Amino acid sequence: MPSPTLKSFSFATLGELQVALEFFNYFHDGFIRRSTISTSQQFSQVADPYADPPRLDLTLTIAHYNYAYGPDGFTRPFTQEIEATFEYVTDFTADWTGRSPDGYLFNVACEARERPIHGLALNGNEACLRVVLVGKRLIAGQEWRECEDVVFTCLRGSMCELLAS
């Protein structure tokens, strides 16, 4: 089978994010291979970090398995790595307990939201995307339950396929 063209998506709206997630099967049966939180803060900056907080971005390398179904036949690799970058991240929480398969992705959920405009000196709200990385957790050694492992809001982002390593 010829190598497929690497696909990439940019998103700033819920509809655009959903198109990207649908293409990548919502990362079902995937896992986080790498996560990086980066900031725009520099040592040379003298701005008040409380009035003008630094920009935070989250980059995830996600490995997942593709299933052989779809209207156009199966043309994607079965195993795939995606780099997902989320820009201007706030409201970030992660609930990784160390007792279950942390970083395993069962699904990704998203919705349009509003949040306070980035920076304490600014008033009002801005449209954003709320992203939830859903995992499964074994409860009392008997039952698997879906749980919100990582939750955050962002303004925009991108997703792109990586070359197989």
Image: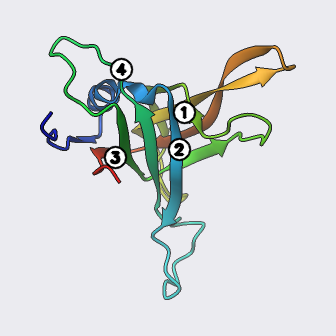
Which class describes the residues within 10 Å of circle 4: few (<14), some (14-19), or many (20+)?
A: some
Which class describes the residues within 10 Å of circle 3: few (<14), some (14-19), or many (20+)?
A: many
Q: Amino acid at mark 4?
A: Tyr
* Separation of marks 4 and 2 at Cα, in angstroms: 18 Å
Q: Which residue is mark 4?
A: 67
Q: Residue at x 37, y 44 (%)?
A: 81
Which residue is most to the bottom?
44
Q: Give residue 127's position: percent from left, percent from top.
A: 39, 37
Q: Nearer the viewer, mark 4 or mark 2?
A: 4
- Horizontally, residue 27 falls left or right of residue 70, namely right
Q: Give residue 105's position: percent from left, percent from top.
A: 54, 31
Q: Tell me which numbered mark, 3 or 1, is placed earlier along the sequence.
A: 1
Q: Amino acid at mark 3?
A: Gly
User: Is 149 or 16 nearer to us in this picture?
Assistant: 149
Q: Which residue is mark 1?
A: 133
Disc number placed over residue 32 in the picture, else none? 2
Q: Which residue is mark 3?
A: 157
Q: Nearer the viewer, mark 1 or mark 4?
A: 4
Q: Residue at x 80, y 37 (%)?
A: 99
Q: Quadrant of residue 111?
A: top left
Kindly state the secondary structure of the residue where label 1 is placed.
strand
- Horizontally, residue 48 falls left or right of residue 64, namely right
Kindly state the secondary structure of the residue where label 4 is placed.
loop
For residue 113, above or below residue 103: above
Q: Tell me which numbered mark, 4 or 2, is placed earlier along the sequence.
A: 2
Q: Nearer the viewer, mark 1 or mark 2?
A: 2
